[in-house]
Image (cartoon, rainbow, N blue to C red):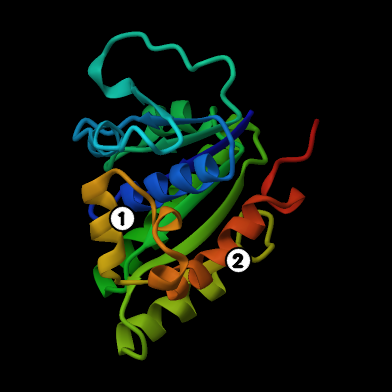
Amino acid sequence: MRSILVLNAKGGCGKTTIATNLAGYYADQGQKVSLVDFDPQGSSTDWAAARPDNRPRISAIPIYDGRRHRIPPDTEVMIMDAPASTHDKALANIMRRAQTVLIPVLPSPIDIRAAERFLVELGGIRKVLDTNVKIAAIANRVRENTRNANSLEDFLGSLKLPNGKRMPFLTMLRSSKNYLDAANRGLSIFEFAPMATVRDREEWAHLVRWLGSKRSIPDEK
């Protein structure tokens, strides 16, 4: 089963937008998808509840409610939406489930500094878990050709993993009304008419291509 975790300790960075659009993408590709919602706000669960009946089904698993939930055994892709302020033991427990971690970062000095601190913590957790989970960054809600956007691009492009290798910086996703429309309707941008979302799809192309490659999956021990 493919397992992808969308994670950042800072709130408001668009984790749910990334998670729900990934879930919609894989479902539209014919995959059996489970969307695991760790966030007490329940935004991913609400999105799945709003999903039209004529769209490919996505199983919403609200882990935050304290009850025991079972991932459907036929799940092929599991997308996990982590809560904000996830640290220490809670962070380690969530990371144990993931093959790949995606970190969305917003183009503001506050978010960039918070991301830098979080990545240091993430590197420490990764060593403690003795896991080679793959980690990559995404610039989110970017307004093109602004000073903050350029600063974020430089920052994400310079990040290195604990082993010294450069962290993959996958894409810059623009601030687009299409994401708001998709969230309201329980859809992903991949389920809108292609001509209406052509720029958004182009920005996602490298991300989904990387997720489909061996580079995004840990080597077997």
Mark 1 lies on residue: 14
User: Residue 74, percent across and down?
Assistant: 59, 19
Q: Give the side of residue 170 with respect to residue 121, left or right.
A: right
Residue 173 visible to an observer of this rendering: no
Determine whether 123 is above or below 42 in the image: below
* Amino acid type at image mark 2: His
Q: Residue at x 36, y 85 (%)?
A: 144
Please tell me which residue lies in front, 45 or 137.
Answer: 45
Dot placed on the residue nearer the N-terminal end, 1 or 2: 1
Outermost residue, right side: 221
User: Residue 154, percent across and down?
Assistant: 48, 81
Q: Give the side of residue 3 with respect to residue 212, left or right.
A: left
- The quarter of the picture where residue 189 lies is bottom left
Q: Give the side of residue 67 with respect to residue 138, left or right.
A: left
The quadrant of the image that shows the C terminus is top right
Residue 87 visible to an observer of this rendering: yes
Mark 2 lies on residue: 206
Outermost residue, top side: 68
